Amino acid sequence: MTCQWIIRSLVIALLCLCIAGWVLSYLPDTQVGFHYDNNKGFALGASLETNGQIHLIGFTGAFSSLVPPETWLGFGFLKVPHSYWYAIIPFWFPTTLAATLLWLTWRTTRPKSVGQGFPVETKPQT
């Protein structure tokens, strides 16, 4: 029983983290990100933009300027050969995935019912 609640709590925490990030991404002057460079011609960057989108950028060579890709339902991908790739994921997508994971976890970890319904007791005949 405690294992079920630990799993449920972790999934609820993931959902709350996604919702908080989604809400905070719409605040003005808010940008969170990281950058990784292995000094061998590859770099990776990710940022949470102010329009509720996650931007992922991978650099494989020299480039002059970044051109964001066209988006459809918030998703976008652009690959410039020998230069960089640029992906956009809307924040509603990981939030929906976390909510679906929570629903599936809740359905699979709930206790199974023993009977077929509510117990019915008959009144003894006198």
Image (tube, rainbow, N blue to C red):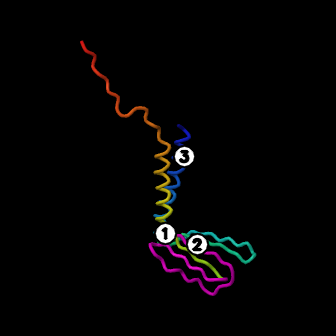
Type of residue at label 2?
Answer: Leu
Q: Which residue is found at the position 47% from the left and 38% from the top?
A: 111
Do residues under tags 2 and 3 come within 8 Å of each other at their CB atoms? no
- In the image, is residue 18 above or below residue 111? below
Range shown magenta: 54-82
Residue receiving disc 2: 56
Mark 2 lies on a secondary structure that is strand
Q: Residue at x 54, y 38 (%)?
A: 2
1 or 3: tag closer to the N-terminus: 3
**Earlier-in-chain disc, 2 versus 3:** 3
Kindly give the residue lying farthest to the left in the view shown: 126
Q: Give residue 17's position: percent from left, percent from top.
A: 52, 57
Query: Type of residue at label 1?
Result: Pro
* Percent x, y of residue 123: 27, 19
- Position of residue 115 relative to residue 28, above or below, is above
**Residue 38 on the magenta segment:** no
Prevalent SS, magenta region: loop
For the point 75% across and 76% down, the residue is 40
The residue that label 1 is drawn on is 90
**Residue 7 — which label?**
3
Whole-Å distance between the Cαs marked 1 and 2?
11 Å
Could you say which disc has been placed on residue 10 in the image? none
The residue sitting at the bottom extreme is 64
Residue drawn at the location 52% of the way across and 72% of the way down: 49
Q: CA distance from mark 1 to mark 3?
A: 26 Å
Give me the C-alpha separation between circle 2 and circle 3.
29 Å
44 left or right of 89 in image: right
SS at mark 1 in the image: strand
Q: Quadrant of residue 125?
A: top left
Amino acid at circle 3:
Ile
